[in-house]
Amino acid sequence: MNQAHPAVIDNLPEFLLHAITLERESVDRYEELAESMAVHNNPGMAELFHKLAHFGRLHASEIEQHAAALVLPDIAPWNFKWSTPEGPESGTRDGVHYLMDQREALEHALYNETQGRDFYASVASSSPDEEVRELAAQFSREESEHVAILESWLTRLDPQNTRRLEDLDPPNSPD
Amino acid sequence: MSGNPVASPVTAKQFKSEIKPVWCPGCGDFSVLSAVTKALAYLALPQQNVALVSGIGCSSRLPAYVSVYGFHGVHGRALAVASGLKAARPDLTVLVAGGDGDGFSIGGNHFLHACRRNMNLTYIVMDNEVYGMTKGQASPTTSPDWAKSMLTPHGPGVPSFNPAAIALASGATFIARGFTGKPNDLAKLIVDAIQHPGFSFIQALSPCTTYRPEQNEWKKIVRPFDADVTADPIEAAQRIQADDGLSTGLIYQTRLPVWQPPNSISAEIEQLERGFQI
């Protein structure tokens, strides 16, 4: 269940299950957003979210290699030790809009990566297991790199790409 | 499932169909889809043993997106169809889904009697307090002063329907309220509801990002009930009435006989067909 301060993660299999779930749920969410943007005729953001899902898949497969020789525990979705409602990189659904532009999408991704970085940093500082602390610190550094990349993309954005799309027949007007 | 994404034989993703949702990005109903598939995966139910029945509306598209047997029925009649299915096939896990307009207005009568009949069904109502598919009219759960629709420019002006109170008064044996901002907690409620013997009702607060964008603020004010589930209907009634409708959790659960008609074959198909011959 969610809590203000995440419960301590005690051992490596438990930690890797959290890490893999975090990445996979993030990939699923980006794919969901991409498909949703495509359905709502925002192909630019569909492409961007597909790209973010691709990066997430790469990171997930790296983490899965750490778990290759381990038996991971079974944890029900509501018993994960997140401090967020879902995995830290799944974001919140209320932060998206069918007309969203590149800046909004990248800010959404930046929020997710920041949450992921903070989750790993929290594990790195609280786990009683040394191996978990080291790996969590490594993952936190990797997430910090992702944060830095997204921040640099945001600073280099072409203002022409940061205008919300116009909907000439917005859903709120008819009645 | 397993929460184990590496070794688990059943995952939530397996319960998602190939059809892409047409819901608006940001719609709470995505979280219900996520919660339902996580619950089904956790219970490791065989896909061919689950049916999901819905009515009409944005949320009633759910069966298309879940990889189990589905029936997208007519407006307000999801519970009637589901009851018939459960009567004929008691071996199936039957889920019913829809929105507040479909369930409490057009289907209001079916809701009352499904509650008191206590068949073994799980009914999930995605409540966004608006008719979204028809572009934003007041529904039974809309507050009296919501004046954003041109059909009701001064607000509907009538008290809003209290689903949990009506369910309790009608005899429901499992009453819960979840929030799509917390899909994992919602998944737990759905698991508990499916495992409950009898009619289980979940009101899922599900913001409509298009017609009720102010509902995005729910995440700041929705909170768990400050008391555990009760089996005392008087206590449950007091709790429901004292609440503003934004507390979540399992509110009331009791055990009563489950209604299930005998399904032995009373006539051959040929005999039935003869009865319809003109």
Image (tube, rainbow, N blue to C red):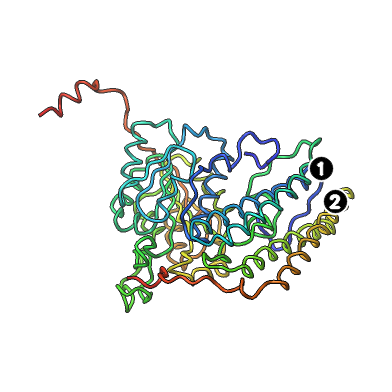
Q: Amino acid at mark 1?
A: His
Residue B121, picture quadrant:
top left
Q: Which mark is residue A66?
A: 1
Q: Which mark is residue B268?
A: none
Element carrying mark 2: helix
Q: Are marks 2 and 1 in contact (CB under 8 Å)?
A: yes
Residue position for label 2: A135
Q: Residues within 10 Å of mark 2 (few under 14, many from 20)?
A: some
Separation (CA) of disc 2 from disc 1: 10 Å
Q: Residue at x 30, y 55 (%)?
A: B108
Q: Residue at x 68, y 58 (%)?
A: A89
Residue B64, picture quadrant:
top left
Looking at the rendered structure, whether the residues under marks 2 and 1 are on a common chain is answered as: yes
The quarter of the rendered structure image containing the N terminus of chain A is bottom right
Element carrying mark 1: helix
Give the left or right position of residue B206, taking residue B88 as reference. right
Residue B167, picture quadrant:
bottom left
Q: Amino acid at mark 2?
A: Leu
B106 in relation to A94, above or below = above
Report x, y in % for residue A146: 77, 61
Residue at the far bottom in the pictured view = B154
Give the left or right position of residue B77, taking residue A160 as reference. left
Give the left or right position of residue A51, taking residue A39 as reference. right
